[in-house]
């Protein structure tokens, strides 16, 4: 709201600026600006202050000022006959639908203090990686940097520094691998497991230490696998499940203990599956959802829960749709949102559904705008879910928010 305090600010700014005046090109960094899209949208706010509107410049309709809309037309004078200039200091000629004519608008009322910019989500380019790659992993380290490892580029790795928007190469993996997993442990190290290489399916894990930029080979998993899942449990251990191995789709599961560097088998899942998801719930259980079994001939709607306290798997209710190559995100309300994926009956899915851990039930929610699989879903700090990319008739660059 425009309060008496802001009116006093406006009056003081007018007094300060009156001696200097403003031309059309003299819109400096203190002025709140907006583009013609905001001006054309008729009350789509250009500011977090809902009392501000966008007024397009008569000299350049593609640009405008974001300014207070709390005024009376009778208090403003019309622009000069050229409809571009104003004779009054500290004003600028803008189009005003409400006033029905171009008016000389006081620039202090378009100050960023009064009309702060509205944050708009957008995509920005950053520097490119040193190597093109797919089938890789990306892990956010405790120092804020992002470790990208393996994939179609072989055993190469690199680090992204958000503070400088730069990539630097780091030491290579011991093994070429793609379609592997990477888990950030509670101690900050990164455990990479399994994957596929030219030699076949891998059971070899390795550990990255960001303090020394080195990879250390660890004791092998009990089963070679790729397209599997890996989940860091609340006790710090890592649960690896399913995937595709030497005997096809797998239902095996095993635990990695960072304290000893060893692997121990745990009870098998009820279903062999790959291209599934695994989510760590707030109660410490792991929810495994969907996927593919029988060498890709059958997509699953089944879900099951792993209880680390007793080391067993429990069935829970099935999803409404069979799906694999989907995403699963734990929401702030503790429900799990499942999006998209693929099944052999429908094809590529745009459907979404919610799992309620307290009731063990699934409910459908609104569909995504685009059907997609092999996409990503990220939980944002504001609680919304950002879904990006994936595949439909081709690779997608679209993104949407839930």
Image (tube, rainbow, N blue to C red):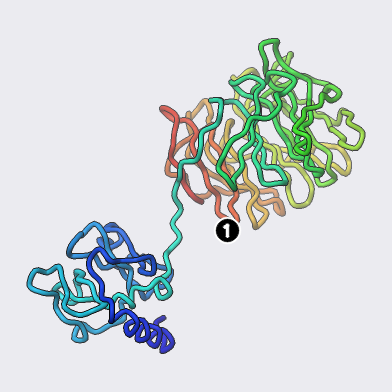
Residue furthest toward the right?
A: 260
In the image shown, does 363 or 71 lie closer to the viewer? 71
**Residue depicted at x 78% and y 39%:** 211
**Residue depicted at x 77% and y 30%:** 214
Residue 170 position in % (x across, y down)? 68, 30
User: In this figure, which residue is indicated by the disc labeled 1?
Assistant: 382
Is 303 displayed left or right of 298 in the figure? Answer: right
Work out whether 340 lies above or below 254: below
Work out whether 386 lies above or below 134: below
Work out whether 206 lies above or below 94: above
Residue 306 position in % (x across, y down)? 79, 39
Q: Quadrant of residue 319?
A: top right
In the image shown, does 391 or 158 lie closer to the viewer? 158
Residue 311 position in % (x across, y down)? 86, 38
* Element assignment for label 1: loop
In the image shown, does 248 or 397 lie closer to the viewer? 397
Image quadrant containing the N terminus: bottom left
Q: Quadrant of residue 116?
A: bottom left
């Amino acid at each position: 709201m425009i309060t008496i305090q802001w009116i006093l600010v406006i009056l003081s700014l007018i007094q300060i600026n009156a001696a200097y005046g403003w031309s059309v090109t003299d819109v400096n960094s203190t002025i709140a600006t907006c583009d013609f899209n905001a001006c054309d949208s008729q009350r789509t706010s250009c500011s977090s202050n809902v009392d501000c509107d966008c007024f397009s410049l008569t000299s350049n309709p593609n640009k405008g000022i974001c300014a207070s809309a709390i005024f009376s037309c009778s208090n403003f004078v019309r622009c000069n006959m050229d409809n571009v200039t104003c004779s009054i200091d500290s004003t600028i000629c803008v189009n005003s639908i409400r006033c029905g004519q171009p008016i000389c608008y006081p620039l202090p009322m378009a100050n960023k203090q009064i009309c702060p910019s509205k944050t708009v989500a957008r995509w920005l380019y950053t520097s490119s990686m040193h190597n093109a790659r797919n089938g890789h992993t990306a892990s956010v380290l405790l120092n804020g940097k992002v470790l990208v490892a393996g994939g179609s580029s072989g055993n190469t790795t690199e680090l992204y520094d958000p503070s400088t928007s730069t990539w630097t190469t780091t030491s290579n993996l011991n093994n070429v691998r793609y379609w592997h997993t990477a888990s950030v442990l509670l101690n900050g190290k990164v455990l990479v497991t399994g994957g596929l290489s030219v030699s076949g399916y891998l059971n070899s894990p390795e550990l990255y230490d960001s303090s020394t930029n080195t990879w250390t080979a660890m004791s092998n998993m009990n089963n070679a696998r790729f397209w599997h899942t890996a989940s860091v449990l609340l006790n710090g251990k890592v649960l690896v499940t399913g995937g595709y191995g030497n005997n096809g789709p797998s239902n095996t599961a095993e635990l990695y203990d960072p304290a000893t560097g060893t692997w121990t088998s745990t009870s098998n899942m009820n279903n062999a599956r790959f291209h599934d998801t695994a989510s760590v719930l707030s109660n410490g259980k792991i929810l495994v959802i969907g996927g593919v079994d029988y060498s890709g001939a059958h997509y699953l709607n089944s879900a099951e829960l792993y209880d680390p306290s007793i080391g067993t798997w429990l069935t829970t209710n099935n999803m409404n749709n069979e799906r694999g190559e989907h995403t699963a995100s734990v929401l702030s309300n503790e429900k799990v949102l499942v999006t998209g994926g693929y099944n052999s009956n429908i094809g590529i899915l745009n459907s979404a559904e919610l799992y309620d851990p307290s009731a063990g039930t699934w409910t459908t929610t609104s569909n995504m705008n685009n059907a997609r699989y092999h996409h990503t879903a990220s939980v944002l700090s504001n609680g919304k879910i950002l879904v990006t990319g994936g595949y439909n008739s081709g690779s997608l660059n679209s993104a949407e928010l839930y």
